[in-house]
Amino acid sequence: MRYLITFSYDGTNFNGYQKQDGLRTIQEEMEKALTFINGGKEVFLVSSGRTDKGVHALCQKAHVDISVDITEYKLKRAMNSNLTNEIHVINVEKVSDDFHARYMVKEKEYCYYLNMGEYNPIERNYVYQYCKKLDIEKMRDAIKYFIGVHNFKSFTPSKDVRNNYVREITYASIDEHDKKIIFTFRGNGFIKYQIRNMVGYLIKVGEGKKEGVDIPKILEMEDRRYASITAHPEGLYLKNVIY
């Protein structure tokens, strides 16, 4: 039976989502719990996508095939009973055997949180403690240039070699609340570090060191050297996955 699992996690003490030898990851913790529930028979969890070290998820989704006969409610309870409290299963539902948590994604939404106010040690793992004033109006003008279908090679790591860097961003905004900036991006998919690199460039715009009008030219260059810094991971959250 195939199940779609919706879950959240605090990525602070994990080396990202994807399983890696000798490193603590979200996928490994989830698969350990599911294997135990599955009577010791090994399982493989297929997520909507990966998150990097230190990045959080409010609503990650993944599918899994298990052979034991168990209701959705009992599977949710069993998983939460066997998981660290850094991960929480929100919902479990049965899906058809041809459902795929990654390939059937229509859109993903990410948020990035930045603090312009006084340094807050309580939030240091959850909000980027930038602690300086930024020009938000300039940043709002700049973020609009990311909307649409573009080749985002300039905003992905130079070591990330792939055949296709084209993605569509359908929505991008910047909001301010209580000296915090919330960047929101929604699109059909995002490449490794893409959002953090876009936020890094927007920070430089807010500092007056970069110009928003240069973004189309940088996108056309398809060269990481012409973009900017990579924003810290702790401010980034996978907010939603839409099928």
Image: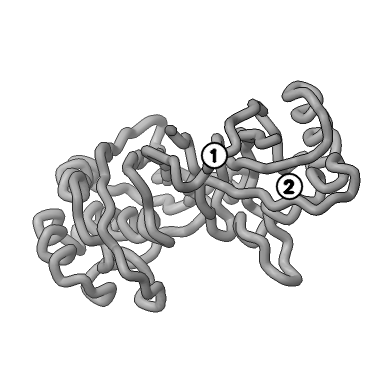
Label 1 vs label 2, nearer the camera: 1
Dot 1 alpha-carbon crowd within 10 angstroms: few under 14, some 14 to 19, many 20 or more: few
Pointer 1: what residue? 98
Label 1 vs 2, first from the N-terminus: 2
Q: Secondary structure at mark 2?
A: helix
**Residue 41 location, x and y as percent?**
85, 50
Res. 127 in view: no
Q: Is residue 66 left or right of residue 54?
A: right
Q: Are marks 1 and 2 in contact (CB under 8 Å)?
A: no
Which amino acid does the dot numbered 1 rest on?
Asp
Judging from the image, the colouring scheme is one colour
Please name whichever residue, 68 or 230, is drawn nearer the observer in this view of the structure.
68
- Give the residue at x 10% y 64%: 217
Marks 1 and 2, how far apart at CA: 22 Å
Please name whichever residue, 41 or 230, is drawn nearer the observer in this view of the structure.
41
Pointer 2: what residue? 30
Which amino acid does the dot numbered 2 rest on?
Met
